[in-house]
Image (tube, grey):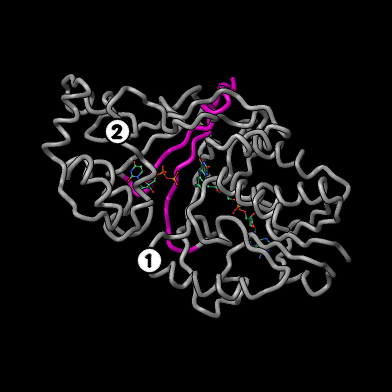
Amino acid sequence: MKVDFLIVGAGFAGCTLAERIAVQLEKEVLLVEKRNHVGGNAYDYYNEDGILVQKYGPHIFHTNNKMVWDYLSQFTEWNNYVHRVLAKVKGKEVYLPINLDTMEKLFDRTFTPEELEDYFESRRVKVDEIKNSKDVVVSQVGEELYELFFKNYTKKQWGVYPDELDPQVTRRLPVRFNRDTRYFTDQYQGMPKHGYTKMFERMLDNRNIHILLNADYKEVVGETEYEKLIFTGPIDYFFNYKHGKLPYRSLDFKFETLSVERYQDAAVVNYPNDHDFTRITEFKHFYLQKHDKTTICYEYPKPEGDPYYPIPRAEYQEMYRKYEEEANKLNNVYFVGRLAEYRYLNMDQVVAGALELFNEV
Ligand code: FAD
Ligand code: UDP
């Protein structure tokens, strides 16, 4: 087969570039995906009971990037879903990120914002330089809350305690002195009105885009003529692991459909200190789907398996840099996305990166 662009991986990165190249440049694209569906980790589908679920765990769209929001809004409407997360600690369910509401419920007392500032001030650990994800938390709220919410959850999720991870991991969660119980405060947030997969299908609905599912690109690359290659899979795999294997954190998803209308009070409930799973997602919250049953999903982190999370640690960044150097030496081959850049990126950041790369290409 002869095409202008060969794109590997049909997640946010691959689909955005395929759409832009097909529509704007009117060039032919072959999109190769090793799974049996498009959408990457954001793929969703109606399960056998007719409930819209996400195959790879909860994905909530949120961004402050108007360009990204406007771009995706061409392919979907959004519902007004606002994400809230509960954490089960000390037998109570409290909202995350830590805010006034969380603290009052946890300690059975009231706080004014000033009292809360004083409370944290008295418990804060003085850290000269924030070097890791533990420093981020203890320097804001002290040891007790660190132990309650972060220490064990992070160990389960990443296999190491927060003091062995770059600050960016726990920095994803702010501390609030108000009663804002939303998980994200971005200007734009919601779920695609009819799900992510429908959105991807609309992005890819173009006669210049040819989709090949169930195919690893190494199986087809020899039989395809192309001018440029865009790779969105794991960068170490591309280079046959010549500088070593980059570690990715993986997950097992265990789904259960229950004969009750509602299982829990928020779409996601975290279990920092109990059980082997980190959190339970109940998908019906995202779309307010009316149904007399509900589907939930447990997430069990593990070291091997499908690569989901690049691990933010300096030593792995060093290994990644070697791959990046190799990548920069190649002509007409581009690397973009969470796995190809080995970065803990959200969906909107991946779309922004893909749109940027499009301008370059
Ligand atoms: P991917 O979605 O991983 O797509 C890459 C594709 O390439 C995959 O489909 C893969 O099968 C394919 N591929 C890989 N290698 C090959 C090969 N050799 N040949 C052919 N195909 C190949 N982000 C948010 O913004 N909000 C959230 O709430 C959120 N929640 C998340 C929850 C979980 C559990 C996880 C794991 C991630 C979450 N994310 C969230 C991050 C989000 O999933 C990513 O930012 C986004 O999906 C990355 O898109 P991508 O195209 O870079 O990669
Ligand atoms: N985290 C935690 N306890 C929680 C929630 C999050 O320790 O109850 C830490 C954990 O290390 C996690 C990180 O904060 O990986 C970022 O959380 P986020 O919800 O952003 O993770 P993701 O959406 O990527 O699963």
**From what the image shows, is residue 358 above or below residue 245?**
above
- The front one of 301 and 211 is 211
In contact (CB < 8 Å): disc 1 and disc 2: no
From the image, which quarter does the N terminus lie in? Answer: bottom right
Question: Percent position (x, y) of residue 128?
Answer: 19, 54
Q: Is residue 28 left or right of residue 180?
A: right
Kindly indicate the quadrant of the structure image that contains residue 54: top right
Number of other residues with Cα within 10 Å of mark 1, as a class: few under 14, some 14 to 19, many 20 or more: few
The three-letter amino acid code for the residue at tag 1 is: Ala
Kindly indicate the quadrant of the structure image that contains residue 146: top left
Residue under label 2: 98
Question: Percent position (x, y) of residue 257?
Answer: 53, 34
- Of the residues tagged 1 and 2, which is closer to the observer? 1
Disc 2 element: loop
Which residue ends up furthest to the bottom in the rendered image? 242
- The front one of 29 and 227 is 227
Q: Which mark is residue 314?
A: 1
Mark 1, ligand 2, within 8 Å: the answer is no
Q: Residue at x 17, y 22 (%)?
A: 108
Q: Residue at x 55, y 61 (%)?
A: 341
Q: Is residue 244 left or right of residue 145?
A: right
Rounded to the nearest whole Å, what is the CA distance between mark 1 and mark 2?
28 Å
Which residue ends up furthest to the left in the rendered image? 122
Mark 2, ligand 2, within 8 Å: the answer is no
The three-letter amino acid code for the residue at tag 2 is: Ile
Q: Is residue 20 left or right of residue 177?
A: right
Q: Residue at x 54, y 28 (%)?
A: 286
Per the image, is 282 magenta? yes
**Residue stretch rendered in magenta on the structure:** 275-304
Question: Percent position (x, y) of residue 25?
Answer: 83, 51
